[in-house]
Structures are given as C-alpha cells and as structure tokens.
Amino acid sequence: MKHLLTLFTIVIFSISATFAQSDFEKYAQEQKTAFNNYSTKEQKAFKNFNDSINREYAKYLEETWKSFNLQKKEVPIKKPITKPPVYDENSAKPQPQELPVVKPQPPTPQLVPKPKPPQEPEPNSKPEAPKENFINTSFFGTNIKLKSSAKQNLHLADVSEKAVADYWTALSNCQYVDWVNDAQRIKNEQKLNDWAVHQLLNTMFKTYFTNGNNNEQVIFNVFVFNQLGYKAKIGRSANNLYVMAAFKEEVYNTTYFIFNDNVRYYVINPLHTELSNIQTCSMNYGGATNYVVLYLSEQPVFSADNRTKNLTFNNKTYTINYNKNKVDFYDTYPLSYYTVYAEAPIDNITWQSVLLQIKPNVSGKSQEDAVNWLLHFVQNAFIYKTDQDNSGYEKWNFAEETFASDFSDCDDRAILFSQLVRHLLGMEVVLIYYPGVHLATAVKFSNPNTKGDYISVDGQNYLLCDPTYIGANLGMAMPQLRNVAVEVIKIK
C-alpha cells in the first residue's frame, strides 16, 4: 500500500509538472509573440519616421553644395626630439627643482565611464543572433553575421548633387532597418565604441554591396551613421567623396570645417590626402544629434589572433603577447587627446603576459625601485624613431600597439609607462607636455623624502619620470628641457 501511495504521488507530481511546464511554455511563447509584435511595431514606426526624414534630406542633397575652406589643428608635437639624450652618470647631477608650469590645461572631458583596470579574461560568450538567414563576414578577423536579405546592387552614376541624392534615395528604399539592427546588435555583442561602429559600417558595405566603390561606401556609411543618430555629412573634393564626422574630442591629423550650427566636422581621410576645401550639403540630417566619441570605456571584443613580441632589457628577453586584430583596429584611430590612449583599458591577452613577464621584476620593491625598473625598461626595450621618420605622419599608440610595434617615440613611451605604473603599482601619474616638443610623465610617491625634479599638482608633488631620457632615473628632466614651462595632463 505504501508503495502504491508513493507511485500515485509521483504520477500526480509528474502530471502537474507537465501541465506546469506546458503552461510556462505557453506563457513564454505568448510573451515572445507580444515582444515580437511590439518590436515590429516599433521598427515600423522607426522606419516611417526615418523615411520621411530621408525623403526630405534627399531633396536638400540635390541642391548645390556649399564650399568650405578646411582648417587643421596644429599637431601638439611639431618638433620632436630626433635622438633621445643619454644620461651621463659621471656628469654633475643638478639640484632638484620645481619645473615651471604654464597656465594649467583644462581637464579633458570624461565622456565615458572610467575604464576598469585590466582583469582576468571573461568567458567568451556572446548573445545568440536571431535565427534567420545570415551572411558570415570578417570584421578585424572576427566572424560577424549580417542579414542575407540586406544584399543590394545599387550604382552611383557620379559625384554630382543629383547622383548622390539619387543614391541616398535608393538606400532609403532598401530594408535599411536591417542594416541599423545589424549595426546595433554587433555593437552590443562586441562592445564597440563609436569609432568601431564607423569601421563596422565599412565592413557591412563591402558585404552588402560586393561590387561597390569607395564613393558609394561613403554615402552608405553616412546614411547608416545618420540613421543611428550620429552627426555625419558627405563631403566632396574633386571626384572623391569623404565621410565627415562630428567628433566629441579634438582630432589633430585631419582637416575640418565649422558648420553653420557651430559644429566642427572632421574629414575622415585614412590616406591623408591633402585637402584645402570641400563641398557639402547646406543642411544637416534631421534627428542626428550624437557626436562620435573616441574614448574607450571597455575593450572591444575581437577574435584572438595572438602574436608575440620579444623585448630585450638587461640581457633578458621578455615575450609579450598581443591580439593582432585589436592592434589592427587601433591602427585606424584618428589622432586625438593623449588621454584617449592613456586611459584606455588594456587588452587581457597583453595584460596577462605583462603580469607574467614584467610584474615579477617590480613585486616586493619599494616604489622608487619599482618605478625606476619600469622607467629603464621602457627607455631601453624599445627602438626610438619619430612618427615622421617611421610613418610620415604623427600617430600616438595605445599600449598594445607600442608592445607590438618595431618603433616608438616619446608620446608612445609616456602613454605605455603611465599605464604600467598605474596598473602594476597603483600609483598616480600625470602626463607632462612640453609644448610642441615632447611628452613625459610625473609620478606621485608616498614618501615625501623622495627627491628629484618635480611639479606640483593640486598641492601634491609629482616627480618627473621621462621614458625617453635613456638611463635617467626618476626625478631627472632632460637638461635641455629643465627650464621649459610644461602643461600638466591629468589621467583619470
């Protein structure tokens, strides 16, 4: 009897569980259907709204474009040090002094949340893409899925106002909501910032429009950028079209003009073509209010293409890993605030090798000895060459790029050194800018008796540390720069 009662209980429980599961599945399906209906309704409303804006904007594109004279921000370092000085241990060491400081530079705006320190790698998991027909393509070595229904075969007749307007209209007659959804989904999946989204749109164009050309790609990029809410315009010089974006930060290695809404539009010009003027539509795209932000609050997710770089210091080889896909992405970056690079989170692949290879050399040491070790490492493990001699134009490296590169100059070394000191030693660092000439760092020490050349920041002494002054210890400024007034750039 007891066994029968037990069996009866199990059967009743199983039936109840089955009904409960059935009810839950029914409820889940109803919720999914309701969400899909809501999503479809919202997407339809989005498309209807944007369709009206696109039709109106196409009319403005047909009108004669206005010509603008282009300006260019002066590059911060115009006359870099061509050959790093070497500290002579036998020379008389000057008495420590406080370095002269010009009018303090206003703090650069913190436009995104402060990056977290490097951490252990996160599990490689991504949200599942919707179960539809997709095209696989590569974005900086990373497989991404795009809706196959989005493939198109459009053609731009020429770069006249009428032809550009016609192409814009043709794009607006496509299922462009799919493009917007693809871009937003991939942005979320891969933790892309605004600059990465711009690069993503170029990849999407090449996938959707397999026979497209550069001018068509520009129109597509600006079209989708506008639908996503970014301030961007189509520019024309001779027979070439250019994407022009309103960056939140200043950009130094390209030209710009100030539009009638007092917004500065920069020409995205990866080939660094010399441009003196540009034509563009006299109206802005309605509804595009977002500036393009270059700061990185988190590492973008790219598939790992792990490479190694061997660095030699004190007759010992240090092997540093880096993700080539991420370095390739960084190589596309415009030249912006130093803090964009110094505050960027470091890729975990690189950081783990830093912890394994470099950290043991500073663990257990005093702040002074640890900083000096890192200082001498950056001074001697990398080959110095100015950007003009190396690439022909000014470029600042993220930390991973400096590890991966064959050459580095003063700004690359200062950025890398500041990252190592902050994250390995937990010490406060500022960048020290010698206007037009040089970039170094200064570090705050706990011991008030630590002496050397210094600056005062918010009432606290920071000792100069120059990763380009070969063989120099902390607190030593280059002799030729000791009396040059500097600017202090705070790092958050």
Image (cartoon, grey):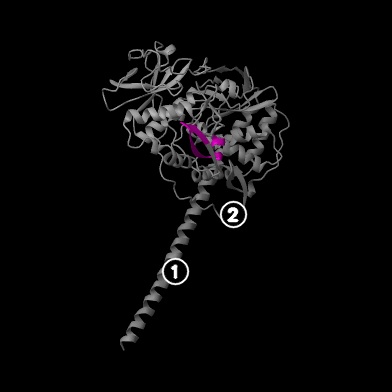
- The amino acid beneath tag 2 is Glu
- The amino acid beneath tag 1 is Ser
Q: Secondary structure at mark 2?
A: loop
Please determine whether, in this image, residue 113 is positioned above or below residue 73.
Answer: below
Circle 2 is placed at which residue position?
132
206 with respect to 344 (left or right): right
Asked if residue 262 shows in the view, the reply is: yes
Name the residue at the bottom extreme: 1
Residue at 46% over, 22% down? 468
Report crowding for label 1: few under 14, some 14 to 19, many 20 or more residues within 10 A (C-alpha).
few
Kindly indicate whether the residue at mark 2 contacts the one at mark 1 (C-beta within 8 angstroms). no
Asked if residue 287 shows in the view, the reply is: no
Circle 1 is placed at which residue position?
22
Using the image, tell me which numbered label, if any, was put on residue 103: none
Which contiguous range is marked in magenta?
310-329
Please determine whether, in this image, residue 177 is positioned above or below residue 214.
Answer: below
428 with respect to 88 (left or right): left
Residue 208 image offset from top left, x and y in percent: 65, 43
Residue 198 image offset from top left, x and y in percent: 56, 35
Q: Main secondary structure of the magenta part?
A: strand
Please determine whether, in this image, residue 23 is positioned above or below residue 81.
Answer: below
